Image (cartoon, rainbow, N blue to C red):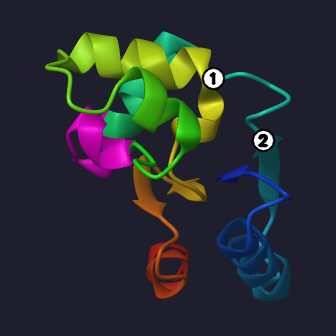
């Protein structure tokens, strides 16, 4: 089953959802601002993405700039920040068969669901 971690207010996330809707494939939508991601889930997603936790952070968000920017944070502290402030999580994230991509650019999603 394909899963999209979606924020309806984000244009890139809406674009990713549209790709899935047009694919004709079955998928699940997780609105992660309404259904918070656990620390364990986030670690699993980061592992599937094959990135460092800092690479999943939206560094232009006000909360990042005010509370975290310029500080030396461990991976666990970064993950905790994203769990506490889900707006910090880059979006959309699409998962398919144990693989995941960040849908920026949207072509990443197309390649994942082929």
Q: Residues within 10 Å of mark 2 (few under 14, many from 20)?
A: some
Location of mark 2 (residue): 30
Please give the name of the residue rendered at 72% of the width and 22% of the height, measured from the top-left corner: 36
Location of mark 1 (residue): 37
The rendered magenta stretch, by its main secondary structure, is classed as helix
**Residue 106 sits above or below residue 11 on the image:** below
Q: Which mark is residue 81?
A: none
Number of numbered discs on residues: 2
Q: Which residues are magenta?
A: 47-56
**Residue 110 sits above or below residue 81 on the image:** below
Please give the name of the residue rendered at 77% of the width and 52% of the height, measured from the top-left corner: 7
Residue 23 in the image: state x and y as whole percent: 75, 85
Residue 28 in the image: state x and y as whole percent: 80, 50
The magenta stretch spans residue 41: no
The magenta stretch spans residue 51: yes
Q: Which is more toward the observer, 51 or 114?
A: 51
CB within 8 Å, label 1 to label 2: yes
């Amino acid at each position: 089953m394909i899963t999209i971690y979606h924020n309806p207010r984000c244009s890139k996330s809406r674009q990713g959802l549209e790709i899935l809707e047009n694919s004709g494939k079955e998928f699940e939508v997780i609105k992660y601002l309404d259904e918070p991601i656990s620390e364990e889930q986030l670690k699993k997603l980061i592992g599937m993405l094959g990135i460092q936790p800092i690479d999943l952070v939206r560094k232009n968000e006000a909360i990042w700039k005010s509370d975290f920017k310029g500080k030396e944070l461990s991976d666990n502290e970064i993950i905790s920040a994203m769990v506490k402030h889900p707006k910090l999580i880059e979006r959309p994230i699409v998962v398919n068969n144990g693989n995941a991509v960040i849908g920026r650019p949207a072509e990443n999603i197309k390649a994942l669901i082929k």
